[in-house]
Every structure is written in structure tokens, then in C-alpha cells.
Amino acid sequence: MPELPEVETVRLQLKHKVVGKTIDSVEVFHGKSVENNPEIEDKLSGKTIGDIDRVGKLMIFSFKKEPDLFLLAHLKMTGQFFYVDMSGVVGGGHSMTEADMDLPMKHTRVGYHFTDHTSLYFNDMRLFGYNKLANAEEVAIAKKKFGPEPIYEDFDADWFYEKLKKRKTPVKAALLDQSFIAGLGNIYVDEALWRAKVSPMRRADKVTKKEAAALAAASGDVMKESIAVGGTTFQHFKDTGGENGNFTDYLQVFGQQGKKCSRCGTEIKKTRCAGRGTHYCPKCQK
DNA sequence: GAGAGTGTTGTAAC
DNA sequence: GGTTACAACACTCT
């Protein structure tokens, strides 16, 4: 479910809620979510969360006075973090009723209980995501697998263009490759391509320098704008307080098949490209 | 009820 | 190395 803006939304919220808190106990409801590594309970009990970092869609928790201990959390398709205190789920100034949110629930996989009686729950219906322990070396290796992120000012559009020229796949497939550029998933790729007026099916090596610059800018913009409103909710995204993201209202092509392109009025089409459902305007994206 | 589709990514195979 | 197909899993929609 989540792409970079959703992961970033969760990271920022968690940073405010759990940094500085000490883990009292860890409850593993499903071994697969912690890579069948039961020692996570012993390793994390008594540790205080120092910071939460992120590379691409991977979250990295670090701990105070533990320079060689990290917790890597990947949400994959359906992972969610929910923060709870004794009076119920709290987030974004709203309090969820018990009927809305009763944790732990059916798809709760891991629970982190803090010494101040608050808890953080990891939910993951499809079990693709994980929470796993890592040392400093493993974190460094994991970080190396990600390309630069278009949301940063120093993203190099010229480098981006040169790299695209070496790829013969549809440009959409290249943009989804996290080792090339990190952060774009299926939703934002479609949105960025629409903004840059480039067809998802265009061969990457046929993208012009001007278009590459537009794509780089559009990729960064669409994700930054989404972060600003708390991410996109399609089916499975909720923030740490159980709230939906608001970017859904701004989607121009994703899930908009059958509707008219807001730019030229042509009907938005859905097809399959790079093995994924793909939405585009056949008229203004060339 | 059967079958297809779902926001991710690692792996195996060519 | 680049690319593609598929698997991991559980649920919803047709």
C-alpha cells in the first residue's frame, strides 16, 4: 500500500510519538512479521528509541546507547503502524472509538509496549512486510540498495537523463526500480508521468532531456505535495492514529479511468504496463 | 463459488 | 548487468 509519502507520513508521526520512549515488552503475534526471529523480544526490551530514519520506503529505528542495534520496518503492501495509549487510539487530535479500532486485532502482527503504558502495533494483512533487527553493517548494506530520492533538492536531473538513456524498458518500469530512483510506487509513477506529459509506455531511452527534467521535477513535487497532506489513502493506508491520508482527492489519473483528463478532457485509460495497472491520458501523454 | 486483481520487492531465470 | 515472470499472502471485486 504505502509509497514514500505514506512511509514518510508514518515516520514523522512516529518520531513525535515514540522517540525517547523505552520498550517494556514486545509481543509477537505472527512470527513471519519478525522473520521468525523470536529474540527480538529480548533484544529490544529495556531499549529506548533514539531516532527514526528512512531510506526509500524502509524505516530504520535506532536506539539510545546502542550504536549497533537497529530495527528495520518495511510496510510492503499492507503494513500499518498504530499508536495507542490507555484511553484508546490517539492521532491527529482525534480519538478513535473502540468500535473503529480495537487493538490488537486480527491482522496485528507485532506489539511494542512502552514503559509509560502506551503501545505501538504493527498490522499487516498480507504478511509481506517485516520488522527485523539489524546491525550497523546490515543497515549500511540496505541503504546502498536505494537510488537517490527525487524529493531532495540535490536530485540531479542530468544524471537522471543519462541513466534513462541506458534503459530499453518502458519508462514506467525504470521509475519503479528502487535501486535507480527511490520512493516512487505505482500510484505516484502514474501521477508523475501524467504531470510530465510522458506516456508510461515510452521507452526510457527515448525520453528527451527536457522531458527527463520535467519527470524529475514532477516526481519530487507529487511526493512532496502528498507528504504535505498526509499521504494517499487507496485501500490500506491509515496513519499511526488510524486516520486516512488526504492526497486521494488530488489524484489526476490513478484510479480515474473512465473520467475525463483535467487538462484536455480526453477519457483516462487503464492498461497494463511493467506488469502493473497503469493509468494515463492517451492524448496529452506522448 | 471461482478467478482476477491489489499500493512491494526479492529471487530465479533467460 | 538488464529484464521479465513469479512468488510471498489475504482479502475484495467481478
Image (spheres, coloured by chain):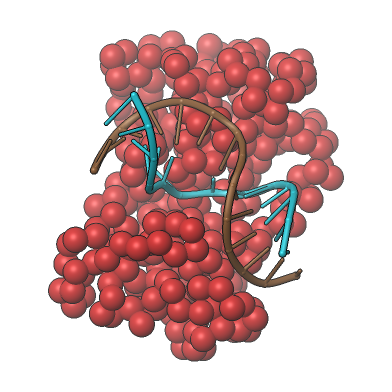
Chain colours: A red, B cyan, C brown
Q: Residue at x 73, y 35 (%)?
A: A70
Q: Where is residue A189 shown, x and y percent of the image?
A: 44, 63
| Left or right side of A227 for A34 | right
Instruction: Give the number of callouts.
Output: 0
Q: Looking at the rendering, in which quadrant would you find the N terminus of chain A?
A: top left
| Left or right side of A228 for A124 | right
Q: Is residue A237 above or below residue A166?
A: above
Q: Where is residue A212 shown, x and y percent of the image?
A: 50, 81
- Quadrant of the image occupied by residue A38: top right
Q: Where is residue A93 shown, x and y percent of the image?
A: 32, 30
Q: Is residue A264 above or below residue A145?
A: below
Asked if residue A161 can be seen in this view, the reply is: no
Q: In this view of the protein, which residue sits in the foreground, A219 or A30?
A: A30
Q: In this view of the protein, which residue sits in the foreground, A237 or A286?
A: A286
Q: Residue at x 44, y 15 (%)?
A: A105
Asked if residue A82 can be seen in this view, the reply is: yes
Q: Where is residue A59 shown, x and y percent of the image?
A: 61, 42
Q: Residue at x 45, y 16 (%)?
A: A106
Q: Is residue A88 above or below residue A19?
A: above
- Quadrant of the image occupied by residue A95: top left
Q: In this view of the protein, which residue sits in the foreground, A21 or A5?
A: A5
Q: Residue at x 64, y 31 (%)?
A: A131
Q: Looking at the rendering, in which quadrant would you find the C terminus of chain A?
A: bottom left
